[in-house]
Amino acid sequence: MEWEMLGYNTRSKLVSHRAARLQVEGAAVRQAVVRIASKQKLTRWARDGKELKLVKGSGKEKDVVEYLVLQKRMDGWKEGDWVVWGTTEETKMKDVMEWERKLLQ
């Protein structure tokens, strides 16, 4: 596989920034979510004998929106470094309505 980031479609945007104090004195956590819109391409290759051939249908440019989650922990009131926690998806209103419906059952 060959992945290429071809460029940004818009500027990245901070969409969430939260902090919470934990039950332990001097412990807290900060979390930030950044929306990144970019154009990417994933090309897959398959071996045909000794030759590599392009897998049909791969290698197409695609607009992608990703939500990168960053986290920083605090211990003894000293901040650690930002680390990549993972990725997430945008929460849609229909998801919230479904969560509320399940809670009321």
Image: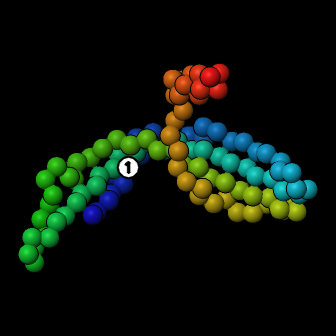
Q: Which residue is mark 1?
A: 7
Where residue 62 sits, quadrant-wise, is: top left
Residue 33 is situated, as x and y percent measured from the top left of the image, at: 60, 44
Side of 69 relative to 39 (left or right): right
Mark 1 neighbour class, 10 Å CA radius: few under 14, some 14 to 19, many 20 or more: few
Residue at the far right: name it. Answer: 25
Side of 66 relative to 6 (left or right): right
Count of numbered marks = 1
Side of 9 relative to 100 (left or right): left
What residue is drawn where x is 83% and y is 62%?
A: 75
Where residue 85 sits, quadrant-wise, is: bottom right
Residue at the far front: name it. Answer: 105
| Front position in the image: 76 or 96 | 96
Residue 47 is situated, as x and y percent measured from the top left of the image, at: 14, 70
Residue 91 is situated, as x and y percent measured from the top left of the image, at: 54, 32
Does any portion of residue 100 appear in the rendered image? Answer: no
Does any portion of residue 99 appear in the rendered image? Answer: yes
What residue is drawn where x is 22% and y is 53%?
A: 59
Residue type, mark 1 in image: Gly
What residue is drawn where x is 33% and y is 50%?
A: 40
What residue is drawn where x is 13% and y is 53%?
A: 56
Residue 72 is situated, as x and y percent measured from the top left of the image, at: 71, 56
Where does the N terminus fall, quadrant-wise?
Answer: bottom left
Where residue 5 sits, quadrant-wise, is: bottom left
Residue 9 in the image: above or below residue 40: above
Where does the C terminus fall, quadrant-wise?
Answer: top right
Side of 27 relative to 50 (left or right): right
The colour scheme used to paint the residues is rainbow
Q: Helix or strand or loop: what does disc 1 sit on?
A: strand
Residue 74 in the image: above or below residue 51: above
